[in-house]
Image: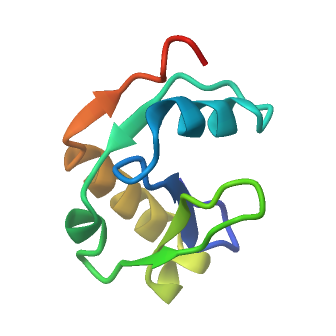
């Protein structure tokens, strides 16, 4: 979920990334990592959200889901979007086993 003062959700475009490579990128960021919840860009872009490619120096597959502006200050709006995105998750993608 986006934190207060933010209205973007960070994600990886795993549909265009080699699984071993994107797993290595995800694990190199120092956070516990178990895999990805998979949703389509079309679904992520509904209900006032937009999907924006935002490559990072160490992750060219990075993108953001931009929430409506009111999500910046309204925690209930952020929760509604988080709940909706969870509900439209298509599947869970496990990380590459050898990475």
- Asked if residue 3 lies left or right of residue 75, the reply is right
Image quadrant in which you'd find residue 5: bottom right
Q: Is residue 37 above or below residue 85?
A: above
Image quadrant in which you'd find residue 58: bottom right
Q: Is residue 51 above or below residue 40?
A: below
Measuring from the top left, give residue 70's x and y in whole percent: 50, 84
Q: Is residue 45 above or below residue 14?
A: below
Q: Residue furthest bottom?
A: 69
- Asked if residue 73 lies left or right of residue 95, the reply is right
Measuring from the top left, give residue 75's x and y in whole percent: 53, 65
> In the picture, which quadrant includes the C terminus?
top right
- Front residue of 74/9: it is 9
- Front residue of 3/96: it is 96
Q: Please tell me how many numbered marks the rendered image carries.
A: 0
Q: Is residue 36 above or below residue 33?
A: below
Q: Residue at x 27, y 56 (%)?
A: 84
Measuring from the top left, give residue 23's x and y in whole percent: 57, 31
- Asked if residue 25 lies left or right of residue 63, the reply is right
Q: Residue at x 51, y 74 (%)?
A: 53
């Amino acid at each position: 979920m986006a934190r207060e003062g933010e209205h973007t959700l960070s994600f990886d475009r795993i549909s265009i990334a080699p699984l071993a490579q994107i797993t290595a990128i995800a694990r190199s960021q120092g956070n516990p990592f178990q895999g990805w919840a998979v949703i389509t860009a079309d679904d992520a872009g509904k209900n006032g959200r937009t999907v924006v490619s935002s490559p990072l120096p160490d992750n060219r597959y990075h993108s953001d889901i931009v929430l409506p502006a009111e999500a910046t200050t309204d925690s209930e709006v952020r929760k509604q979007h988080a709940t909706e995105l969870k509900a439209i998750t298509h599947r869970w993608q496990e990380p590459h086993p050898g990475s």
